[in-house]
Image (tube, rainbow, N blue to C red):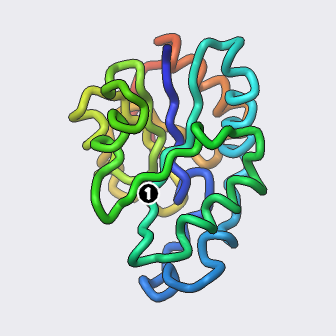
Amino acid sequence: MKKVFFDMDGVLAEYRENCTENDLKKKGYFLTLRPEMNMVNALSRLALESDELGIQVCVLTKVYPTLFKHSVSEKLQWRDEYLPELFDSEFIMVNGEEEEKSEAISAITGSPIDSDCYLIDDYNYNLAEWAKNGGNAVKYVNSINDKNRSFVGNRILNTMTSDEIYSYILNMLSGSTTPTNAAA
């Protein structure tokens, strides 16, 4: 079964470019992140049709319970507001103070990352780690994260509609897309 993991910060929720570590520590920071509605709507549609499509759809996000003590509870509240169709098991939080996403996913899901595991993320480091461990990395290009176009591979652009994102993901899962390094 193909599995699609969506990062939260910078993909499903806005990335605030000028925020500081102190901003991340404030109560309300994670809860008030504006949703990237085209991504949220595409994920919702994929999740609702996942049985029919024969795929698994999850959110895979890092939390920092010691450093950013509100990150866990506020990300759960954010999920409840914007992605109520997800089961708890489909909203995976990795303790970023202890491990990387690619390290945690095998223990959490009970199976190793392989070529049927896709991570949609805005952060090249996470994508590189995912690919290094055997998964497929997909860059979410927002307005600030791809200035030097250093990622080569499948890309989802923040200018795409939810229908375009949905179709792109389905085509990618079926092998119908060619990885591209096209400019955003």
Residue 111 lies, with reference to residue 100, above or below; the image says above
* Number of marks in the rendered image: 1
Q: Position of residue 117 (x, y in %)?
A: 41, 26
Which residue is more in the foreground, 61 or 162? Answer: 61
Q: Residue at x 68, y 53 (%)?
A: 79
Q: Which residue is mark 1?
A: 62
Which residue is more in the foreground, 111 or 10? Answer: 111
In the displayed image of the protein, which residue is found farthest to the left? 132
Residue 10 lies, with reference to residue 6, above or below; the image says below
Q: Position of residue 85 (x, y in %)?
A: 76, 39
Q: Residue at x 75, y 52 (%)?
A: 82
Q: Is residue 60 left or right of residue 150?
A: right
Check disc 1: other Cα within 10 Å, few if <14, some if 14-19, many if 20+.
many
**Kind of residue at disc 1:** Lys
Residue 160 lies, with reference to residue 50, above or below; the image says below
Q: Position of residue 142 (x, y in %)?
A: 53, 55
Q: Quadrant of residue 128?
A: top left
| Label 1: element kind | strand
Q: Residue at x 48, y 63 (%)?
A: 144
Residue 46 lies, with reference to residue 64, above or below; the image says above
Q: Is residue 97 left or right of residue 158?
A: left
Q: Is residue 83 left or right of residue 156?
A: right
Q: Position of residue 162 (x, y in %)?
A: 72, 37
Which residue is more in the foreground, 126 or 3? Answer: 3
Q: Is residue 82 left or right of residue 68?
A: right
